Amino acid sequence: MNNDTLFPPLGDADIRELTAFRHELHRFPELSGEEQETARRVCAMLEPTAPDALLEGLGGHGVAAVYDSGMPGPTILVRSELDALPILELGEIDHRSAKPGTAHLCGHDGHSTILVGLGRVLSRQRPPRGRVVLMFQPAEETGQGAAAVVADPRYGEIRPDWAFSLHNMPEIEKGSAELVVGPANCASRGMWIRLTGSTAHASRPGDGLSPMRAMCTLLPALEALGAGQLPEPDFVMVTPTHARLGEPSYGVAPGEAWLQVTLRTADDAHMSDVVQRAEELAKRTALDNGLAVAIGYEDVFPASVNDADAVDCLAEALARSGIRRITPPGPSVASEDFGRFGKAGARSAMVFLGAGPDSPAVHTPEYDFDDTLIPVGVRIFSEAIAACLDRTGAESGDRLGS
């Protein structure tokens, strides 16, 4: 590991305090859109770092801490997530969730702790040029948070030239990280379909119009729209996630069916195509069975695409941090709303930091963030900021610090 760095490293006391803070966040998780107390805890930890500006309530409960050099230069945004998942935690840890059915089982508590640690570094050494914005983003799990932050009128005050993020990945060997130029995360969206007929007495089902056969036909037909394998650009995956037929009753033949599927593609163009085909299939099935149909979408994630220059900065940061870079053949099949910052004009990139295959996978009931990744993540971001500043010089397009 190269110790010649622009920013000072964390000390042992920092790491102990940050680990305790991560455990506190883990004990008190909040779901997407409900992160008010999480944001309050983050602000309390940031206060001693004396940011030059602190924007609260961005896009919901988002928090942005600005560390400004006062000199012309780029605005560099580093993002973490605040929200937890609606899953019952089963791991036997001292800091397990105090809210049954809600838990930090994706590592957002660890990611936000890394940013708090980065705030400590920046409090001791401001960037020599430009400014750094630490963006604690709400509602990543629903795909709504980054879009809401970018749409917030105050986002113009911190609009970045560059944006960086990381995600811990248990399936990647510890001491390694995956980093790719171009598509980094698949596009996905949740599609719901309501099929409506009419109810009847269960002894006289012919008096009504049941959507049962249509539902049983439509679910495998939607799944069959899937094609290809990553990294093929025409990759499509359709995953049925929920279905409901009528109400739980023995005396009523159903008059309505509700279906939910997740559509997943390698890029946004193929998403538009599969949306059209799925809608045509649903409408045709409804028509063939004499049913009314309604269709809607939730949890919409565009594809995340890593900018080549931003990747170069992260690649240099990995090298200076002693982390082995792995270049995957294509994007992660999972989705991530960080791509919204790139679509809003920032040169952006996300890196996937290995937590090791001995760790349970994210979104499983036994998962817990690996605390030893906290100083590693802080070092990566510190080095990425330094590399970005080295790369940009005094570019004429860089924004002035506030």
Image (spheres, rainbow, N blue to C red):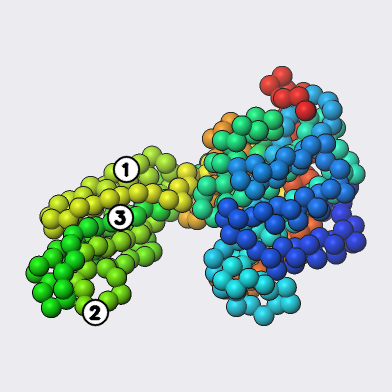
Q: 312 above or below 112?
A: above
Estimate the spatial distance between the alpha carbons at disc 2 and disc 1, rounded to whole Å. 40 Å
Q: Is residue 301 left or right of residue 89?
A: left
Locate residue 139, reporting x and y percent: 57, 51
Locate residue 264, reporting x and y percent: 41, 52
| Picture quadrant of residue 251 | bottom left
Estimate the spatial distance between the alpha carbons at disc 2 and disc 3, rounded to whole Å. 24 Å
Q: Residue at left 74%, top 47%?
A: 381
For residue 193, the mark is 3
Residue furthest out toward the top: 396
Between 226 and 369, which is closer to the camera in this rendering? 369
Estimate the spatial distance between the alpha carbons at disc 3 and disc 1, rounded to whole Å. 18 Å
Q: Along the polypeptide, which appears first: circle 3 or circle 1?
A: 3
Q: Along the polypeptide, which appears first: circle 2 or circle 3?
A: 3
**Residue to which mark 1 is pinned:** 273
Circle 3 sits in a helix, a strand or a loop, which is it? Answer: strand
For residue 250, the mark is 2
Q: Amino acid at mark 1?
A: Asp
Q: Along the polypeptide, which appears first: circle 2 or circle 1?
A: 2
Q: Amino acid at mark 2?
A: Tyr
Please state which of the two labelled residues, at mark 2 or mark 1, is closer to the viewer.
2
| Picture quadrant of residue 243 | bottom left
Circle 1 sits in a helix, a strand or a loop, which is it? Answer: helix
